[in-house]
Amino acid sequence: MKKISRRSVLAAAGLSVIAMALSACGSSSSTASSAAASGAASGSAQAINALEDLQGKTVGVQLGTTGDIYMSGEVGTGLDIAAVEQYNKAADAVQALLSNKIDAVCIDDQVAKKFVEANSDELAILDTAYAVEDYAICVSKDRTDLTSSLNEAIAELKDDGTLDAILDKYINKTEGAEGYVTPEGTEYPNGTLIMATNAAFEPYEYIENGAVIGIDAEFGKAICDKLGYELQIEDMEFDSIIPAVQSGKADFGMAGMTVTEERLENIDFTDTYCTGVQSIIVLK
């Protein structure tokens, strides 16, 4: 597998592909998830080999994610998809695809790879990813001091190689990569920070042996260790993360979350720490 660093995850060529798709596919409106669309895909036997083949198809997304924002908005309109089906969990969207209830799933490329690995006889990823995105930590707009502290920790952990070590463990699958381990003697004089996440987004966050692990969980731990805080992770639905941070039920949200103009209206973000790409899963 090609090694992926924090500076370059995938080429930006996907952006030109989406521009062509938007200009070529017309301006018919995309329909949000509806009773008419649920329970049945488009019924067409035509294979989906490119973005343009999504025209007239039903695409599944995880509610509140970047894939949802894109497919329910201008991107879906430009591709002339028939409908968007929203699911609380990415796994539910993939199961709907396997059951022929939808035609495709739009999701982060690293997460897509995990689902395809588990269903390699039935699923595939379109060769061309369509949108590059930056992931960051969301923080309440009235916690500027915390945002500043998180940014300092992120910068230090990038510079000292900690983030790359975590990516080597979870994405690059480098032999012997241990990721991040809390240094002996680490103290927590500043109390506890609560991190809101949605632990159904492997390799960013997922549950193994009863614990939330993954890139975000490990990097969140490294950040909190650096700042002298214990880390407490709260697992919840993805679309509950920003409200939890806004209300103070959580101190920050970390869940492979993309910085978008829409989200910036309600929440602040730290500097980015990882780059991802939206991809399309289809049946073989």
Image (cartoon, helix red, strand yellow):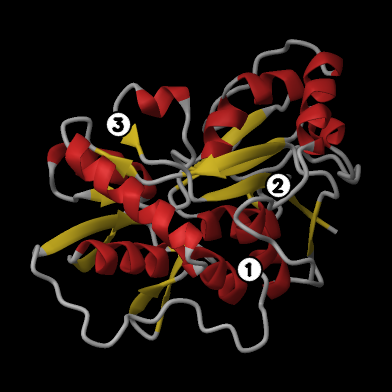
Label 1: which residue?
A: 171
Residue 128 in the figure: left or right of residue 259: right
Q: Give the amino acid type for the residue marked by disc 2 in the picture.
A: Ser
| Relative depth, front residue between 15 and 104 | 15
Q: Residue at x 47, y 29 (%)?
A: 260
Callout 3: SS? loop
Q: In front: 178, or 23?
A: 178
Residue 267, which numbered label?
A: 3
At a point 21% along the width and 35% down the height, the residue shown is 144
Query: Could you tell me which residue is drawn at 83 percent across and 30 percent down?
Result: 17
Classify 10 Å Cα crowding around label 2: few (below 14), some (14-19), many (20 and above): many
Q: Residue at x 61, y 43 (%)?
A: 60
Q: Secondary structure at mark 2?
A: strand
Percent of width and height locating residue 89: 47, 54
Query: Is residue 201 visible in this depiction of the protein?
Result: no
**Helix, strand or loop at disc 1?**
loop
Q: Earlier in the sequence, mark 1 or mark 3?
A: 1
Whole-Å distance between the Cαs marked 3 and 2? 26 Å
Asked if the residue under mark 3 is in contact with the one under mark 1, i.e. CB atoms within 8 Å, the reply is no
Q: Amino acid at mark 3?
A: Ile
**Which image quarter: residue 130?**
top right
Percent from the top left, x then y, of residue 114?
64, 68
Q: Quadrant of residue 235?
A: bottom left
Which is nearer the eye, 139 or 36? 139
The local crowd at label 3, few if under 14, some if 14 to 19, many if 20 or more residues have their Cα within 10 Å, is some
Q: Are marks 3 and 2 in contact (CB under 8 Å)?
A: no
The disc labelled 1 sits on which kind of residue? Ile
On residue 62, the disc is: none
Quadrant position of the N terminus in the picture: bottom right
The residue indicated by pointer 2 is: 279
Considering only vertical position in the picture, is 88 above or below 216?
A: above
Of labels 1 and 2, earlier in sequence is: 1
